[in-house]
Image (spheres, rainbow, N blue to C red):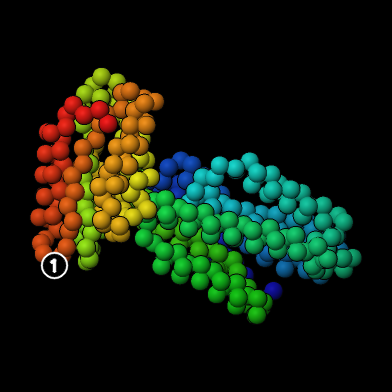
């Protein structure tokens, strides 16, 4: 076993230890995200150490055969957990129990193979090799990668995060590292590649968190200012304000007020999210920057009020919402002037319609 390979594994494991401490001391990650990131880094470190130990045990003293089998069982069992954990980090699934059952089933098969040798085998000379059903492990590993990719793409859409180029490059990095490993197995770059990818995922998640409003999951004020400052073409800018929201908090409490904001945010996203970016820019203030279907603003506004009316039929305390909008063309005026015009229209709407019922 070369010193180069040992150094690669050492640096991979050490980087995961560093990231584990970074996660544990983070003041921005939620508790469940901390747990998942820690599992991810621990899994990468454990699997890479098992690969290193398995290579060290190759053709070693026959008395170490069962240790060799145990090490390979652990490595092959936990490797698919990496992709699944990535998927859990970026999106909490509705069927986690099914995923967990599949991971447990795969782990049991890997452990059974240590005895019966149908996925992998360690022979009487203490030599590890693939067996006829090694495709079971390959399928589990590929499935976990596909799940991670699908979950990440779904999250990009849900959180309106414009990090697709970063994601594509990150996936390209993984593919490049694994491809090099496939054609030149002696380089042992797979775990180093996955370790660096784990670090990139942390950056990806942090960027997404920094632009997301924790309550409504819409883009926050910081993201609003950044995106609005980058507008170069024609857009429609809409502002929304929750009517008498202070009275809602005073009469029903802040917990119910948060519920109202979350419900209204969901309605705004459902109606406008297909055509542009949706923001929560203040306590009870929302904004939408429509990039497409600009001529359909009035129809979308009507759809929003209809949707809020349906919600109000189930919850009579849900407040009304006022809206104002403007079509903005950078060649005609500044974005500041456009924002003022949309804001003024929203307050006029609020003043005219204090007694509306829909």
Query: Where does label 1 land, which residue?
Result: 331
Compared across the picture, whether 180 is left or right of 76 comes to: left
Q: Quadrant of residue 65?
A: bottom right
The residue drawn where x is 70% and y is 61% is 139
Compared across the picture, whether 182 is left or right of 317 comes to: right
Q: The C terminus appears in which quarter of the rendering?
A: top left
25 w.r.t. 312: above or below: below
The residue drawn where x is 36% and y is 26% is 313
Q: Quadrant of residue 76?
A: bottom right
The residue drawn where x is 60% and y is 78% is 180
In front: 67, or 327? 327
Q: How many marks?
A: 1
126 w.r.t. 277: above or below: below
Q: Position of residue 210 (x, y in %)?
A: 33, 51
Q: Secondary structure at mark 1?
A: loop
Question: Can residue 262 be seen by looking at this rendering?
Answer: no
Q: Position of residue 190 (x, y in %)?
A: 60, 69
Q: Residue furthest toward the right?
A: 124
The residue drawn where x is 59% and y is 60% is 146
């Amino acid at each position: 076993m070369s010193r180069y390979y040992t150094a690669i594994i050492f640096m991979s494991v050490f980087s995961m230890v560093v990231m584990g401490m970074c996660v544990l001391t983070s003041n921005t990650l939620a508790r469940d995200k901390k747990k998942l990131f820690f599992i991810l880094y621990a899994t990468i470190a454990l699997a890479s150490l098992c690969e290193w130990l398995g290579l060290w045990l190759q053709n070693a003293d026959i008395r170490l055969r069962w240790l060799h089998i145990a090490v390979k069982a652990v490595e092959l069992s936990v490797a698919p957990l990496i992709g699944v954990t990535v998927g859990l980090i970026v999106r909490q699934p509705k069927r986690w129990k099914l995923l967990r059952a599949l991971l447990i089933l795969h782990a049991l098969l890997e452990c059974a193979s240590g005895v019966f040798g149908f996925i992998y085998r360690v022979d009487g000379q203490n030599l590890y090799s693939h067996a006829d059903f090694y495709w079971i492990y390959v399928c589990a590993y590929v499935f976990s990668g596909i799940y991670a990719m699908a979950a990440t793409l779904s999250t990009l859409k849900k959180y309106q995060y414009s990090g697709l180029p970063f994601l594509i490059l990150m996936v390209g990095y993984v593919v490049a590292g694994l491809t090099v490993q496939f054609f030149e197995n002696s380089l042992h770059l797979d775990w180093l590649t996955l370790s660096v990818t784990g670090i990139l995922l942390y950056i990806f998640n942090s960027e997404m968190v920094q632009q997301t409003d924790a309550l409504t999951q819409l883009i926050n004020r910081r993201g609003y200012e950044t995106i609005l400052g980058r507008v170069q073409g024609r857009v429609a800018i809409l502002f929304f304000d929750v009517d008498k929201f202070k009275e809602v908090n005073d009469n029903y409490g802040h917990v119910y007020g948060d519920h109202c904001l979350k419900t209204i945010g969901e309605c705004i996203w459902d109606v406008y999210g297909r055509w542009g970016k949706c923001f929560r820019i203040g306590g009870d203030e929302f904004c939408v920057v429509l990039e497409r279907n600009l001529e359909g603003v009035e129809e979308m506004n009507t759809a929003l009020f209809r949707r809020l009316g349906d919600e109000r039929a189930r919850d009579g305390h849900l407040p009304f919402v006022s809206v104002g909008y403007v079509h903005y063309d950078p060649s005609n005026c500044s974005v500041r002037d456009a924002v003022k015009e949309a804001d003024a229209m929203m307050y006029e709407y609020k003043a005219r319609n204090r007694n509306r019922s829909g």
